[in-house]
Amino acid sequence: MLRKSIDFVIPDDRLRVGSKALTQFKSLTVCPDQEICSSSSQGRYTPPPAFHVHTEDSEVTVGLYLQSETLWFLPPLDSSFSFPKKHKLPSQFSLASDQTILPPWRPGRGSGVFKPGCDPVVVPKSHILLEAFLRLHARDSGKRIGAFSIAMISYIEEYIDDDGLLDANQLPEPLKTSYKELRQGGKPVRQWTKELKEALRILEDSEDDSSC
């Protein structure tokens, strides 16, 4: 069963602080058994969070993911995220309430841009999100969690790129070329994946994925 979750990416050295902060909310409860919980099980088909809590009277969880496991290709998250202001954020991110970048609510397209005046939430821009999933796919293909990233790439292609909300030219090489080849559909996904891994210098049987 696919569970809904609200997920955050944090610096690796802030995991303990972030975990403590979540447990201070009365509406959030610590997972009673992370080994058997489907939200943290190593047998799940999506990458598990480093820490998660459960929301009261709901199946929604709140998870913390480490930057080294998700956005490792970006500079370290710094103090500009503590009290985020639009003009002070790194160029790879925006506020979830930024109406100049994010679309309004549309049928079948999620909740849309956050309302102005809400507590600030920082989100990666669409090309950064796509870059993350491309790199995750190259890293995790062939593993249990490998299908997750290719599904999200397809989602971005259909619901973000096709709606004119993605500038794929902002992707770095070789990802820009790889994504355009995937869009054209001229290669089987297996071949495309193999060439993507080769372009990122990831060996098929490598246990060290830090190079991607």
Image (cartoon, grey):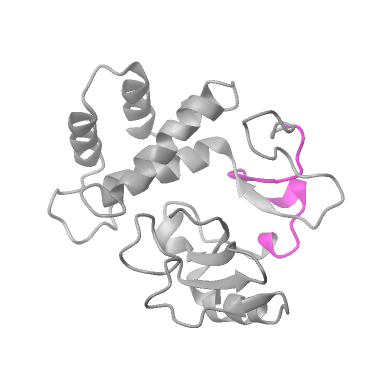
Residue at screen point 37% across, 78% down = 35
| The one of 190 and 130 positioned closer to us in this rendering | 190
What residue sits 76% from the left and 55% below the top? Answer: 120
Q: How many marks?
A: 0
Res 99 → quadrant: top right
In the rendered image, residue 87, in percent from the top left (x then y), is placed at: 76, 46
Estimate the x, y position of residue 6 in percent, counting from the top left: 60, 58
Percent of width and height locating residue 37: 43, 72
Q: Which of the image's four quarters has the N terminus?
A: bottom left
Q: Is residue 17 above or below residue 134?
A: below
Which residue shows up at 83% across the image and 53% down it?
118
Residue at the extreme left of the image, as rendered: 205
Residue drawn at 42 percent across, 52 percent down: 73
Is residue 85 shown in magenta?
yes
Residue 151 quadrant: top left
Does residue 86 appear in this view? yes
Q: Does residue 171 appear anywhere in the picture?
A: no
Residue furthest to the right in view is 117
Characterize the magenta stretch by its predominant secondary structure: loop
- Check the image and report above or below for 137 versus 59: above
Q: Is residue 43 left or right of residue 158?
A: left
Q: Which residues are magenta?
A: 81-100
The quadrant in which residue 114 appears is top right
Q: Is residue 210 magenta?
A: no
Q: Is residue 175 left or right of residue 26?
A: left
